[in-house]
């Protein structure tokens, strides 16, 4: 079973969707993009088992049984200063809105590491 946590709106926790899929239902992250009707995938952070997946790899990042997938929106704002606000917000969103799955997803969350 592939477990997907999709949070369309991080400011509305009740919008969270926790959905299991079989490996026959979804093969890649691109399949999930279509399932959830995500029109601009670059507006989201995509992670498999806590590893960030670059937007350019959505079509090739294969999903396997027992994978956990997190799809959370990128929080955009002003400021600057070099702080990794996006990473902090994404981590908090995973912990707050994924329940038990959040710890496992967050444990290996590493920006820039490809899913192998």
Image (cartoon, grey):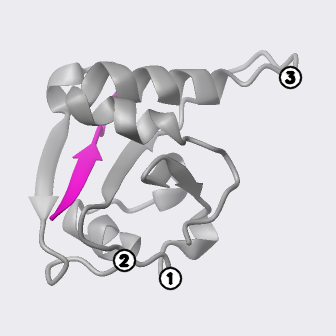
Q: Residue 85 versus residue 27: which sits nearer the camera?
A: 27
Relative side of 115 to 29, left or right: right
Front position among marks 3 and 1? 1
Q: Identify the residue at image location x=12%, y=73%.
A: 22
- Tell me, yes or no, whether the two marked residues, 2 and 1, touch with CB atoms within 8 Å: yes
Q: Residue 102 versus residue 11: which sits nearer the camera?
A: 102
Q: Is 2 part of what is drawn in magenta? A: yes
> N-terminal of the two: label 2 or label 3?
2
State the residue position of label 2.
28
Neighbours of disc 2 within 10 Å: few (<14), some (14-19), many (20+): some
Quadrant for the C terminus, please.
bottom right
* Label annotation for residue 60: 1
Relative side of 111 to 38, left or right: right
Quadrant for the N terminus, please.
bottom left
Q: CA distance from mark 2 to mark 3?
A: 32 Å
The answer to which quarter of the image holds residue 5 is top left
Neighbours of disc 1 within 10 Å: few (<14), some (14-19), many (20+): few
Q: Identify the residue at image location x=31%, y=53%.
A: 68
Q: Name the spot of residue 29 as percent of width and height, x first.
A: 38, 70
Mark 2 lies on a secondary structure that is loop
6 versus 68 height, above or below: above
Q: Name the spot of residue 28 as percent of width and height, x first.
A: 36, 77
> N-terminal of the two: label 2 or label 1?
2
Q: Identify the residue at image location x=54%, y=52%.
A: 51
């Amino acid at each position: 079973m592939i477990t997907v946590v999709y949070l369309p709106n991080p400011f509305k926790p009740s919008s969270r969707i926790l959905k299991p899929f079989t490996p026959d239902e979804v093969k890649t992250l691109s399949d999930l993009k279509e399932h959830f009707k995500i029109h601009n995938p670059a507006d989201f952070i995509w992670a498999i088992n806590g590893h960030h997946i670059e937007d350019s790899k959505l079509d090739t990042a294969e999903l396997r049984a027992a994978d956990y997938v997190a799809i959370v929106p990128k929080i955009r704002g002003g400021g600057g200063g070099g702080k990794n606000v996006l990473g902090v917000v994404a981590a908090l969103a995973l912990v707050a809105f994924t329940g038990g799955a959040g710890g496992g997803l967050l444990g290996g969350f590493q920006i820039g590491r490809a899913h192998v």
